[in-house]
């Protein structure tokens, strides 16, 4: 009897715990995997102490190590990131602190920067004043679940940052939170195409009429798969996806490996001018750098034909991410951001375009040190996709393209998506953005700058070379 009584109590306790896990909204893993999810949290909690007995340091994992992910998780949850004893990190660069850092009363809030010009060749009717130097990079609805996109939109609004749609077109979930939105146009022109797949000016006007859509972005390539288009299987082309992207329901949709109507620098300028003329809003270009000679040719054309000059460029490193990409492209094609950003900044300086063309850096820049480095090197803004995925609860399960993401971030199964509560995760998106900006500003103040616009290359040192700043690459070898 005693044994049976214990068994019954145990079963009742497990049933109550199961019900509790399914009802709570703070932990997606527990909501999707009641009871057994505790084993992950148990292992994660003890791991910090047990790893001293094994040869697996916290900074050895790829593509993002445990130190980086833990910083994002704790920031998103609003938990202290203070650490004890010493650093486990193995940095490739350090910041040069000033002998007399900025006092609290001397600190200045980030002043913001204007994107686009109101007068002259290449002017737009509605330039965009960006109030945050850290924002959300493009992630398509379909690659991300509707709950994840909703959470990002709501959190972006709370944090005062923009979010880009990704190449999958504008979904209602992007507008749900009321944040500023960047409408991205990929090679298939999803969301801005006509029945034949060509750019539709009518669709552009409809989108530009949305007050929340602040800018348009021409995507030439992303870091994980430069020079490669995509295939959207017909099984995934639901009625909703078909309506958003402007494609036939139930049919495979193949994205070309580049824009079919952009085959030269001059054609790129003409496309930028066309979109800006129709929408009246700033237009940028996202690309991955291969041959640096392209930059001088492009920027020289911007000087000669200012009407086709983009209002910003987003440079993505070859280490950028994607839901799925061929290994050779992901691993071996495209310059990493540590090289590419220097080339872009130097070329912009040579052609006198500093105040005309803003630079956005992206690719694994998810922690304050990486963001501060990019700003020191001359970037005006930094955008992150995977950092904000971590803030939603992504555990780097590496199942993005399968539809079976255990945290619901990139899942396609409703049973998994249901575990991600947009309201709870929106708060985490805001906490992450706020904490990152706060700590980047802390680095700036330590270096003697009143705000992050005071960052200079001399504030950062390449440890391996032992020189101040990363020398901006010259020429185009």
Image (spheres, rainbow, N blue to C red):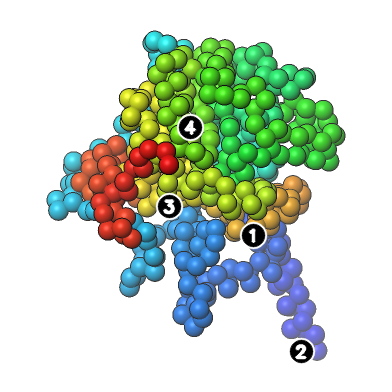
Q: Nearer the viewer, residue 197 or 166?
A: 197
Q: Which comes before the other along the chain, label 4 or label 1?
A: 4
Contact check, label 2 and label 4, Cβ < 8 Å: no
How much space separates mark 2 and mark 1, taking CA atoms? Answer: 43 Å
Contact check, label 3 and label 1, Cβ < 8 Å: no
Residue 35 on image: x %, y %: 69, 68
Q: Which comes before the other along the chain, label 3 or label 2?
A: 2
Please give the residue where the numbered disc 3 appears in the rendered image. 367
Residue 334, relative to residue 110: is it above or below?
Answer: below
SS for dot 1: loop
Q: Which comes before the other along the chain, label 3 or label 1?
A: 3
Q: Count up the numbered dots.
A: 4
Q: Nearer the viewer, residue 101 or 106?
A: 101
Q: Which comes before the other along the chain, label 4 or label 3?
A: 4
Please give the name of the residue rendered at 57% of the width and 24% of the height, measured from the top-left corner.
Answer: 264
Please give the residue where the numbered disc 2 appears in the rendered image. 2
Image quadrant where residue 385 sits: top right
Contact check, label 3 and label 2, Cβ < 8 Å: no
SS for dot 4: helix
Q: Which comes before the other along the chain, label 2 or label 1?
A: 2
Q: Which comes before the other along the chain, label 2 or label 4?
A: 2
How much space separates mark 2 and mark 4, taking CA atoms? Answer: 80 Å
């Amino acid at each position: 009897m005693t044994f049976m009584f214990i068994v019954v109590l145990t079963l009742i306790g497990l049933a109550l715990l199961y019900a509790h896990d399914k009802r709570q909204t703070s932990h997606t893993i527990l909501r999707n995997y009641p009871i057994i999810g505790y084993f992950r949290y148990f292992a994660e909690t003890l791991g910090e102490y047990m790893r001293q007995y094994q040869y697996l340091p916290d900074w050895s994992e790829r593509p993002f190590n445990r130190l980086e992910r833990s910083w994002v998780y704790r920031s998103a949850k609003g938990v202290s990131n203070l650490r004890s004893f010493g650093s486990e990190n193995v940095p490739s660069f350090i910041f040069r602190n000033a002998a007399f850092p900025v006092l609290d009363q001397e600190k200045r809030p980030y002043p913001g920067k204007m994107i686009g010009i109101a007068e002259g060749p290449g002017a737009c009717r509605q330039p965009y004043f960006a109030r945050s130097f850290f924002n959300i990079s493009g992630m398509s609805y379909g690659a991300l679940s509707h709950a994840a996109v909703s959470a990002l939109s709501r959190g972006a609004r709370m944090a005062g940052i923009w979010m880009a749609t990704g190449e999958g077109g504008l979904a209602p979930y992007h507008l749900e939170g009321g944040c500023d939105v960047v409408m991205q146009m990929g090679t298939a022109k999803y969301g801005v195409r006509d029945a034949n797949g060509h750019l539709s000016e009518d669709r552009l006007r409809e989108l530009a009429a949305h007050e929340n859509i602040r800018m348009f972005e021409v995507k030439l390539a992303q870091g994980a798969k430069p020079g490669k288009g995509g295939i959207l299987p017909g099984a995934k082309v639901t009625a909703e996806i078909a309506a958003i992207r402007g494609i036939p329901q139930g049919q495979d949709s193949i994205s070309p490996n580049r824009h079919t109507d952009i085959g030269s620098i001059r054609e790129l300028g003409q496309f930028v001018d066309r979109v800006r003329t129709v929408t009246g809003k700033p237009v940028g270009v996202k690309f991955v750098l291969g041959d640096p000679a392209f930059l001088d040719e492009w920027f020289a054309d911007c000087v000669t034909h200012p009407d086709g000059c983009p209002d910003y460029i987003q440079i993505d490193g070859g280490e950028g991410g994607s839901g799925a990409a061929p290994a050779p492209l992901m691993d071996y094609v495209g310059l990493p951001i540590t090289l590419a950003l220097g080339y872009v900044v130097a070329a912009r300086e040579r052609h006198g375009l500093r105040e005309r063309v803003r630079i956005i850096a992206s690719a694994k820049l998810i922690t304050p040190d990486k963001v501060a480095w990019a700003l020191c090197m001359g970037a005006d803004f930094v955008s992150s996709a995977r950092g904000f995925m971590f803030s939603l609860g992504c555990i780097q399960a590496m199942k993005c393209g399968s539809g079976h993401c255990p945290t619901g971030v990139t899942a396609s199964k409703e049973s998994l998506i249901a575990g991600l509560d947009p309201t709870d995760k929106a708060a985490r998106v805001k906490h992450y953005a706020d904490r990152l900006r706060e700590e980047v500003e802390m680095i700036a103040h330590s270096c003697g700058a009143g705000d992050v616009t005071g960052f200079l290359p001399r504030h950062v040192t390449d440890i391996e070379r032992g020189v101040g700043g990363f020398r901006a690459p010259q020429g185009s070898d």
